[in-house]
Amino acid sequence: MNEQDFGNKIKQQLDLALDLDAATRDRLKIARQHALARQRMTEPVFALAWVDAVVGRLSGNPASAGVALAGAALIIALVGVQYWQRMPTVEEIEEIDSALLTSDLPINAYLDKGFDSWLKRSQH
């Protein structure tokens, strides 16, 4: 039995127990319809509630959605740390600049494309 059927059975039982005249029932029905119409007119708000529902359905357990989201956040954090560590620091850049400026070769030698290919051949 799904939720809709269960709700209909409860409604039928409550309707049988009611001892109201037709005019009162009609007024209650109209009031209910007005309340439902006002409820549907609310503006949607952006939220990530759908993520919890999707992950819960995929895993079969809605409680594991939090675990999956935490795992995704951990992976993003690890990628960020790795990227941050691969960025050269000021000291490393300073060391490279100092080596270039204090070397015996002129700066034009480093700009020459043939010099780069000569370095590659000489390393082998």
Image (spheres, rainbow, N blue to C red):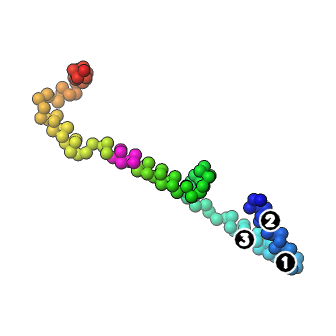
Q: Dot 2, crowdedness within 10 Å: few (<14), some or many (≥20)?
A: few
- Judged from the image, the secondary structure of the residue bearing numbered disc 3 is helix
Q: Which mark is residue 8?
A: 2
Residue linked to disc 3: 35
Confirm or deny contact between disc 1 and disc 3 (CB under 8 A).
Answer: no
Query: Which residue: 22% across, 42% down?
Result: 92
The image shows residue 77, relative to residue 28, as above or below, that is above
Of label 1 and label 3, which has the lower sequence position? 1
Q: Nearer the viewer, residue 7 or 37?
A: 7
Magenta stretch? 78-84
Picture coordinates of residue 124 (x, y %)? Answer: 24, 21
Residue linked to disc 1: 18
Mark nearest the camera among 2 and 3 is 2
Main SS of the magenta part reads: helix
Q: Dot 1, crowdedness within 10 Å: few (<14), some or many (≥20)?
A: few
Q: Which mark is residue 79?
A: none
Q: Is residue 50 visible?
A: no
Q: Amino acid at mark 2?
A: Asn
Of label 1 and label 2, which has the lower sequence position? 2
Q: Is residue 80 visible?
A: yes
Query: Which residue: 62% across, 52% down?
Result: 60
Q: Nearer the viewer, residue 61 or 107?
A: 61
Q: What is the CA distance from the residue labelled 1 to the residue labelled 3?
A: 21 Å
Confirm or deny contact between disc 2 and disc 3 (CB under 8 A).
Answer: no
Mark nearest the camera among 1 and 3 is 1
Q: Is residue 81 magenta?
A: yes
The image shows residue 12, relative to residue 122, as above or below, that is below
Q: Is residue 21 magenta?
A: no
- Judged from the image, the secondary structure of the residue bearing numbered disc 2 is helix
